[in-house]
Image (cartoon, rainbow, N blue to C red):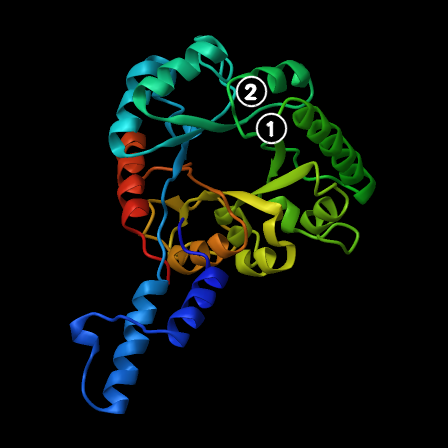
Amino acid sequence: MNYDRRKFVHTLGAMAAGSLILPAWACKSGDSGQTQAVETALDEMAKGSLDAFGLQLYTLRDDLPKDPKGILKQIASFGYKQIEGYEGDKGMFWGMGHTGFKQYLDELGMEMVASHCGIGEGFEEKAAQAGEIGMKYLICPWIGPQKTLADYKKFADQFNECGEICKQNGLRFAYHNHAYTFEETEGVMPQDFLMDNTDPELVDYEMDIYWVVTGGADPVAYMEKYGDRFRLCHVKDRLKDATPDEHEASCDLGTGSIDYAKILGIASQKGMKYYILEQERYDNSTPLKSAEHGAKYLSQLVFA
């Protein structure tokens, strides 16, 4: 995303000190008309959009195992430039090996920026392979709701250890939230506890915006509070008529209740680097059609 608000404001100051060149339609006679035209022009200049966006391959979990190369080729044709993997029966690299997988993605013009993976076993090898092919992140996708803060502290310590391993291999570690970290434990919000007890130099976070909303929290408030600790996000929409206690209510982007024009605009100002579509539920579509729809939506999205 090209737009940086602070840089934009600085540029405006420099332009105001010199000469601001506006299109002909903005140069109306009369002070009020000209002022309004200038403001309109600046508003248009300030809008941003996504330079690139990715797809979490779990979206295509029913199709991908049948024909990994064919499905990846279709993903590329939809306009995705980035992918985020997960560990299926054939591992993160779908039987091609990490270097073979990278080579095939290179041919398609895509990059594997991250992958979800288990952190209990073989994490050192996963980090070494990910670093060798230039991946940016390994991500823990799930720890489940814990009974005590002491239990969450054990995971926070493990995240720091994983972060150190990733750092040694030239990439970073992150944790992906679900709704359960927005349900208080011993009077504390587990999401806050994890973020406050992990080293910012070693651990980032992937905000699943759908699960933040489903958990009853405000994604913008968390971005404001923790700034660039959130470097990746999962983008999926929530059914407009879903009740607060309904968790499995995702839907195609742009058809639900989440205001992504606003949220992603703020995210882009707070240090978000990777915008990853994920779809978990299908009513009137198929996984591939949802992925294609999502790519079109994100390519046309203009920040509010």
**Amino acid type, callout 1:** Leu
Pick the front one: 191 or 4: 4
Residue 192 coordinates in the image, percent (x, y): 70, 51
Q: Which residue is mark 2?
A: 130
Task: Give the mark count.
Answer: 2
Mark 1–mark 2 Cα distance, whole angstroms, equals: 8 Å
Sequence-first tag of 1 and 2: 2
In the rendered image, the residue lying farthest to the front is: 18
* Amino acid type, label 2: Ala
Where disc 1 sits, the SS reads loop
Task: Decide: few, some or many residues near mark 2? Use Cα within 10 Å; few <14, some 14-19, many ≥20.
Answer: many
Residue 93 lies left or right of residue 180; in this view the side is left
The picture places residue 242, in percent across and down from the top left corner, at 42, 54
Q: Nearer the viewer, residue 298 or 40?
A: 40
Quadrant location of residue 63? top left
Q: Residue at (66%, 33%) from the top-left corner?
A: 143
Label placed on residue 135: none
Tell me what residue is drawn at x 32 percent, y 64 percent: 45
- Of all residues shown, which one is farthest toward the left? 24
| Above or below: residue 268 compared with residue 90 | below
**Residue at 30 percent of width and 37 percent of height:** 290
Contact check, label 1 and label 2, Cβ < 8 Å: yes
Q: Which residue is mark 1?
A: 171
Frontmost residue, 9 versus 190: 9
Name the quarter where the C terminus is drawn.
bottom left
Q: Secondary structure at mark 2?
A: helix
Q: Residues within 10 Å of mark 1 (few under 14, many from 20)?
A: many
In the displayed structure image, the side of residue 23 where residue 131 appears, left or right = right
